[in-house]
Image (cartoon, rainbow, N blue to C red):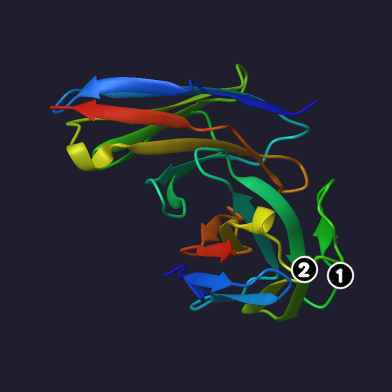
């Protein structure tokens, strides 16, 4: 079957770095997405990886290892506004997104 | 770019009435749109996949006669919740896929439905 695993909740300190891991199993693979969702709002697109390696975009970076079925989202210089849920989603051979349950990130001062 | 709008943002209705929610891709054409539902503190749940010019594909357990989907153009999909009941109260979110190399889904801002 198809499955996405990511931690339910993580806590980090303002100004620090946090890494949110995601493992996936899908029927075929056409990319790995990360979305951010603030409470009460719709998800917003953060990043897309389809090749192995690290993609950096400002304070956020996303890494993919296709052979390991593994990705992580790295957030640097954490700010209070980064408190949100982070959703990992893998795109299968039919370009359907298989969603993880999301990781709730709590930032403490 | 890649902006998706949704209307209305919030709706309160009486039990038994129907509610229509519109989803528009503003700056790109979307052959495929998706409708999700999210209950408080729960994950996104895909309800249906909407393809322009054809019938929507519903996920298991989603009643197609209750949640009517129309994808009449490359920029507009509508979801009608028919004979709404209090248990239909939820956050309904649409997304549109850009059809490019990445096939990225971009989300609308969501519609909060409260059925009294």
Chain letter, disc 2 residue:
B
Specify whether A86 is left or right of B29. left
Chain letter, disc 1 residue:
B
Instruction: Judge if badges 1 and 2 mark residues of a common chain.
Output: yes
For label 1, the residue is B55
Specify whether B23 is left or right of B50. left
Quadrant hosting residue A56? top left
For label 2, the residue is B51
Q: Is residue A54 visible?
A: no
Please tell me the numbered disc located at residue B100: none
Q: Is residue B64 visible?
A: yes
Specify whether B2 is left or right of A13. right
Question: Callout 2 environment at 10 Å: few (<14), some (14 to 19), or many (20+)?
Answer: many
Compared with A97, A25 (above or below) is above
**Quadrant into which the N terminus of chain A falls:** top right
Q: Residue furthest bottom?
A: B73
């Amino acid at each position: 079957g198809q499955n996405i695993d990511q931690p339910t909740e993580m806590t980090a300190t303002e100004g620090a770095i946090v890494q949110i891991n995601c493992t996936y199993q899908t029927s075929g693979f056409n990319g790995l997405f990360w979305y951010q969702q603030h409470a009460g709002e719709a998800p917003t697109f953060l990043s897309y990886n389809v090749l192995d390696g690290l993609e950096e975009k400002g304070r956020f970076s996303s890494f993919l290892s296709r052979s390991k079925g593994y990705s992580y989202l790295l957030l640097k210089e954490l700010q209070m506004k980064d408190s949100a849920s982070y959703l990992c989603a893998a795109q299968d051979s039919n370009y359907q997104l298989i969603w993880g349950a999301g990781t709730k990130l709590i930032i403490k001062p | 770019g890649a902006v998706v709008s949704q209307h209305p943002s919030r709706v309160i209705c009486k039990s038994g009435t129907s509610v229509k929610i519109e989803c528009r891709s503003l700056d790109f054409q979307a052959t495929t749109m998706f409708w999700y539902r999210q209950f408080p503190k729960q994950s996104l749940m895909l309800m249906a996949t909407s393809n322009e010019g054809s019938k929507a594909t519903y996920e298991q357990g989603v009643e197609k006669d209750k949640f009517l989907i129309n994808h009449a153009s490359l920029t507009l999909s509508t979801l009608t919740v028919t004979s709404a009941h209090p248990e239909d109260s939820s956050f309904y979110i649409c997304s549109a896929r850009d059809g490019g190399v990445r096939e990225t889904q971009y989300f609308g801002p969501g519609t909060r439905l409260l059925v009294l």
